[in-house]
Amino acid sequence: MEPSVTRRTFVQAMGVGAGTAAGLAPFAAQGADNPENTLKIVAVACSPRKGMTTAQALGFCLEAAKAVDPDRIETELIDLAEMEIPGYMAAGIPLKPGHRDDFPKVAEKLADRGVAGIIIGSPVYYRNVTALCKAFIDRCRVLRAGFALSNKVGGAVAVGGGRNGGQELTLQAIHSALLCQEMLVVGDGRPTAHAGGAVWNPGTDDISEDKIGLATVRNLGRRVAEVALQRAPAE
Ligand SMILES: Cc1cc2nc3c(=O)[nH]c(=O)nc-3n(C[C@H](O)[C@H](O)[C@H](O)COP(=O)(O)O)c2cc1C
């Protein structure tokens, strides 16, 4: 087992400590092995609008993940909406005066050994991810430096205002980033079985009527949980 990293070295690696070269130092996975044999699946909502359609879709996704094995699966939704994630720090530029950096606390959660699955959700903006999502993905560079997310199961959810507004391209953009992290990317499980959660917001901010889209979201959650459980059989 790799030694756990102290809070201090973690913070330094994230680039918020004095004297670091803007958060580019690699670091290992965090935490101890889980004695209770539970697995955590975390979803990250990358809309600038808190609690809106992307976060709601991820809520359905996590609900389906939990239902696979309520005793063993824990879930958490991280909403980036009110966080500040300066993307420029990924390029080694130090935090600018007057800016705040909330990325370290998110990274710390994702790198935890108990996290077996990570689902990234983004609204579709111009047939791609949001700027917030891209900044988050870029900041995950420090996690890649130590491959702290290696072998975690990964999935993606995209919510667009058009029925065919670029959801699949957005899913693909997220998948590409997860592959670079050496994660195990899965799509929505059968019977829909395509690239992940692809949801339509018809302009009302109410996704409840998109039955097909919500089926893809639920099948993704189930699939992430099933694969995570297969990789960590009960003792
Ligand atoms: C700047 C901007 C660009 C957008 N571009 C697209 C687009 O290319 N395709 C699409 O289907 N929807 C597009 N939308 C609509 C959003 O994807 C849609 O409203 C989504 O549900 C928003 O997610 P949220 O409720 O989590 O904020 C765009 C919205 C904004 C604000």
Image (cartoon, grey):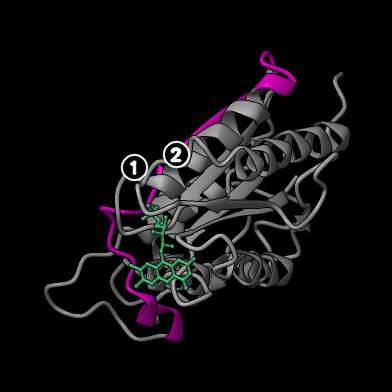
Residue to which mark 1 is pinned:
51
Ligand 1 is found in which quarter of the picture? bottom left
Q: Nearer the viewer, residue 71 or 25?
A: 71
> From which residue to which does the magenta span run?
67-91
State left or right for residue 157 relative to residue 99: right
Instruction: Tell me what residue is drawn at x 20 percent, y 80 percent.
Output: 96
Q: Is mark 2 within 8 Å of ligand 1?
A: yes
Residue 125 point in image, percent of width and height: 44, 71
Instruction: Tell me what residue is drawn at x 68 percent, y 69 percent.
Output: 172
Q: Nearer the viewer, residue 68 or 196?
A: 196
Q: The residue under label 1 is which amino acid type?
A: Gly
State left or right for residue 89 relative to residue 210: left
Residue to which mark 2 is pinned:
56
> Is residue 37 in sight in this rendering?
no
Instruction: Tell me what residue is drawn at x 81 percent, y 33 percent.
Output: 226
In this view, 111 is above or below 235 = below
Indicate the secondary structure of the residue bearing disc 1.
Answer: loop
Quadrant showing the N terminus: top right
Residue 91 point in image, percent of width and height: 44, 86
